[in-house]
Amino acid sequence: MRKAALTILAFITAMAVCGQTRSGMNAPGGTTADESARPAELPLPSIPQTLTAPEDRAAYLTAHFWDAMDFADTTLTADRTFMEQNFANFVSVFPALTPQALKAAVSTLMTRASASTAAYRTLTDIAEKYLYDPNSPMLNEEHYIAFLEETAGSPLLSEAERSKQAFNLRCALKNRQGTVAADFSYTDRQGRHRTLHTTEAETLMLIFYDPDCEHCTEMMDKMKGDTALHDAVTSGSVKVLAIYSDGDRPLWDKTKGGLPAEWTVGFDTSGIQEHGTYILRAMPTVYILDAGKTVIAKDFPAERF
């Protein structure tokens, strides 16, 4: 999938005057043994040479990505591997889209998929798996919101399915990128009562963590050992605020000293999880905030460290 994604991104950004396409893209035959072993992929549409700006090429590609797909063909729509491969290829282009083009691309796809209730439900499920599962390398709530806005009220889904989509949408919209992060109170390691909004920082890395979680500990250790992060914190350009919100004060007291001295480490005193102030579906969950506490990045992958 990664190779296919890179191929597509290269395809969009290539200069139109070159008129180059992927080898064998429009021909059903001529595949190598290696290619035939891979899941079938839809042919990419030919982008007009008049479109030279990467964002315009990306918009055209996503608008016409599914043109060769017959959603009434149950043989194709029931092939989960085929559907997932092409969905992954499709969303790999999303980073190059404007918000308007992304919304239009998703709307076009789901409208076409509505020709088959089974296909519509399959794509709804795949979108959640690829864009909302905390373990997915393609996790992106902004991209997933575009699908949720299409599916939350769809008559093609059952009442229970629509309810789930509406719930996921409410969760995804909380502390959304570009909005001001919700305030909360905490006690720091020195026993001072503080709040998020009064924690001054040029750039704030807000980490929700659980010291009793093995994966969380592993990721936090990587962060502690990251030289670039350490240098940024030492220089004052970045502040790290690590918050434990599970309510076990003895556990926090026992482990708080294990985090770097230059970090601000806090124990939640406002009931973040109880009140759903933040939706913490995995630990650690990382937010990047600017000086005004506007969310720059949400669910920033801790694996980068």
Image (tube, helix red, strand yellow):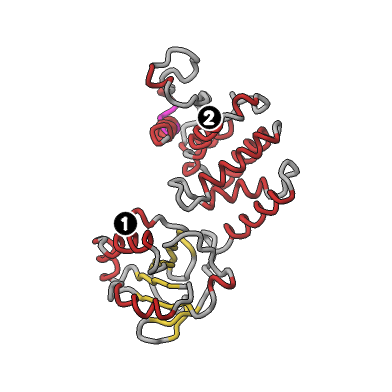
Is the residue marked by circle 2 packed among few (<14), some (14-19), or many (20+) residues within 10 Å? some
Q: How many marks?
A: 2
Q: Which residue is mark 2?
A: 82
Q: Nearer the viewer, residue 211 or 200?
A: 211
Residue 305: give its label. 1
Query: Vertical placement of 24 versus 230: above or below?
Result: above
Q: Identify the amino acid type marked 2.
A: Phe
Residue at the spot 59% in from the left edge and 72% down from the top edge: 275
Say which quarter of the image contains residue 285. bottom left
Q: State left or right for residue 303 relative to residue 127.
A: left
Say which quarter of the image contains residue 283. bottom left
Q: State left or right for residue 278 relative to residue 189.
A: right
Say which quarter of the image contains residue 238. bottom left
Q: Position of residue 304 (x, y in %)?
A: 34, 53
- Sequence-earlier tag: 2 or 1: 2
Viewer can see residue 234: yes
Which dot, 2 or 1, sits closer to the camera? 2
Q: Nearer the viewer, residue 288 or 120?
A: 120
Is the residue marked by circle 1 packed among few (<14), some (14-19), or many (20+) residues within 10 Å? some
Q: Quadrant of the C terminus?
A: bottom left
Rounded to the nearest whole Å, what is the CA distance between mark 2 and mark 1?
33 Å
Q: State left or right for residue 303 relative to residue 271.
A: left
Magenta residues? 12-16
**Dominant SS in magenta:** helix
Query: Vertical placement of 51 versus 293: above or below?
Result: above
